[in-house]
Image: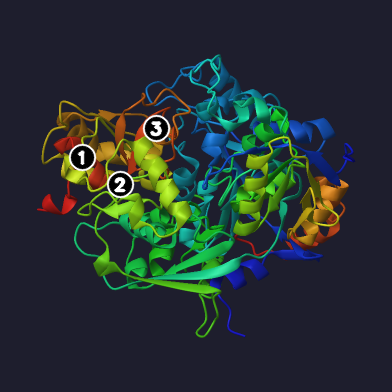
Amino acid sequence: MAKTLYDKVWQAHVIDQIGDDSLIYIDRHLIHEVTSPQAFAGLNEKGRKVRRPDRTVGTMDHSISTRSLAIDACGPQNALQLNTLAKNCEEHGIKLYPVGHQKQGIVHVMGPELGLIQPGMTVVCGDSHTATHGAFGALAFGIGTSQVEHVLATQTLKQSRAKSMLIKVNGTLPVGITAKDIILAIIGKIGHAGATGHVIEYAGEAITGLTMEERMTVCNMSIEAGAKAGLIAPDETTFEYLKGREYAPEGSTWDDALAYWKTLYTEEGAQFDSVVELDAADIAPQVTWGTNPGQVIGVDAPVPAPDDFNDPIEKESAVKALAYMGLQPGEKLADIAVNHVFIGSCTNGRIEDLRAAAHIAKQGKVADSVTAIVVPGSGNVKKQAEAEGLDKIFLDAGFEWRLPGCSMCLGMNDDNLEVGDRCASTSNRNFEGRQGRGARTHLVSPAMAAAAAISGKFADVRDYQE
Amino acid sequence: MSETQLGFSQHTGIAAPLDQANVDTDQIIPKQFLTGVTRAGYGKHLFHDWRYLDLEEKQPNPDFSLNKPEHKGASILLARENFGCGSSREHAPWALADFGFKTVIATSFADIFYGNCINNQLVPVALSSAQMDTLFAAVSNDPTLKITVDLPSQTVSFNDTQLAFDIAEHHKNNLLKGLDAIGQTLELTDAITAFEGKQPAWL
């Protein structure tokens, strides 16, 4: 029977079948400070060891300041968590990229950057945006802390096979439309829980035409459609990206790996449990209007009314979301003022994202009413951006240029919004209170965020293309 | 009630209704409470933004379900579709369990949250939309209603109504036996070692 990419990666990792469950091997385990301390404490209580410290890599990202490299810059509780990670990594022989290290960064930015993620791997992390790494054709998914402990101790997880979903984005992307718009449009179409219980494979010309960073943006938000993971088949773009990276294989090992990676694709005639198709030509720059990522519209569409939804649950959700967001049905996004802009996160904190934002930023100045921050996804992204002079473009336009970290995506540090603030954000979740209690988040692409910073309202980035 | 420290069999209690879809883990336990390094003490911050009118948690929001006198002591939480979506934070089930919930009954659950519940002996019960309508109506009609969740028979019952639910066999077993999952897997160490021996050189 013809196999899907998911079939192939899954079957290559099954160690044992235990009833209706499989024990699967985990090739790469990424850890950070927030979801690991209790896992290490659990190991220590039982006197258990980390089975494969060489397969485990740590970084500091969630709880750190983006203004200072001091470990206690965000208070003693954050410092305790960061120091606990450092201590655990030291005791168990795990490589850690701490605050201030050139290679430190958001776990889903620095991991791929170092070549830690390769096609056909199984990758886990105590973070739901682990889905990012599916961009390499790796089966990558977020896990809870009990599972982090399980992987540390055994390098395995008990898992059930998920259902499969093919999402094809056909045709070429119009000018001004980005990977972020693709994934938001997909979530808008299938819904915030549309892929629950599924592993998505993204395909179609609009997907295969994306760079690796763009593919990461798409896969990153698979979880926002409820999916277990998102996959894109590896191809020349993938191999080109990986070659020469620190943890990528070399010499004849590279050749062997490459030969295997080239077998990782969905075979003709393979069956999916469900198939969704979109036309790239239909995708406009996306802006979320509600409090889950499925509540999204094109920048030129009016804010919807609850009565636009047939499903009673969606109708009810729309009523609540409009009230929280302080929006009226029929309002135009171009009339809605923002007072904060956040450019960064594991979704959109890579160098290409910053280039896209800078391209818009140099066409104006941040509006007086707006506070705009740019947070590179890693030390390496920051260094590259500075080498290209992007920091200067941002600073000259009135943006703040910060140190790498998760920052205002979730505000576990001091990058938080106040009640009533309205933010155009390149992050991944517009949940109530996500960026601060009572704050209102609109998810957009980096270019759209930069355009909002300049105009002080949502603006159509297609009007800024030179 | 016949819960043991090691496993869950059956639980009877009253329910608190949270009649909404897409309750995300940021709502269950907001980010500012995730800086802990232990599994304990998250219950007091459960649903912080909805439950309290102030940041210091001194003024309970009287309109929020968990604060209503008729739902005091609730050990069963009712919700709608996609409960526990968003962040993988296991602090969410830790907070629910620490608050005193033994089970969450909802139309559907997000995948990671569901797994986290299983690993914490917090029983996730998925009922159909129509079954949830029945349950919400019954609790609205009588908040003191005693509801029994019976895992071996996979039923939720109250008065003379019995609602059946599905749960994967391995999840059910784990909840019933409350086994040490890591200990079980460590017994398969030879198979894991053999698997590692067959992995290619680049991994």
Residue type at tag 2: Val
Q: Nearer the viewer, residue B187 or A448?
A: A448
Q: What residue is drawn where x is 13% and y is 33%? A: A365
Where residue B44 appears, as percent x and y from the top left, is 64, 23
- The crowding category of the residue bearing disc 3, from other C-alpha atoms within 10 Å (few below 14, some 14 to 19, many at least 20), is many
Q: Are marks 1 and 2 in contact (CB under 8 Å)?
A: yes
- The crowding category of the residue bearing disc 2, from other C-alpha atoms within 10 Å (few below 14, some 14 to 19, many at least 20), is many
Q: Nearer the viewer, residue A243 or A286?
A: A286
Q: Secondary structure at mark 2?
A: loop
Q: Which residue is mark 3?
A: A408
The lab-note entry on whether marks 1 and 3 share a chain reads: yes
Q: Quick check: can you spot residue A4?
A: yes
Label ID, residue A444: 2
Q: Quick check: can you spot residue B185?
A: no
A445 on left or right of B83:
left
Q: Is A403 located above or below residue A57 in the figure?
A: above
Image quarter in which the N terminus of chain A is found: bottom right
Where residue A262 appears, as percent x and y from the top left, is 50, 74
- In primary-sequence order, the first of circles 3 and 2 is 3
Q: Is B102 located above or below residue A157 in the figure?
A: above
Q: Chain of mark 3?
A: A
Where residue A121 appears, as percent x and y from the top left, is 58, 60
Q: Is B72 located above or below residue A356 in the figure?
A: above
Q: Chain of mark 2?
A: A
- The crowding category of the residue bearing disc 1, from other C-alpha atoms within 10 Å (few below 14, some 14 to 19, many at least 20), is many
Q: Which residue is mark 1?
A: A452
Residue type at tag 3: Met
Residue type at tag 1: Ala
Q: Secondary structure at mark 3?
A: helix
Q: CA distance from mark 3 to mark 2?
A: 14 Å
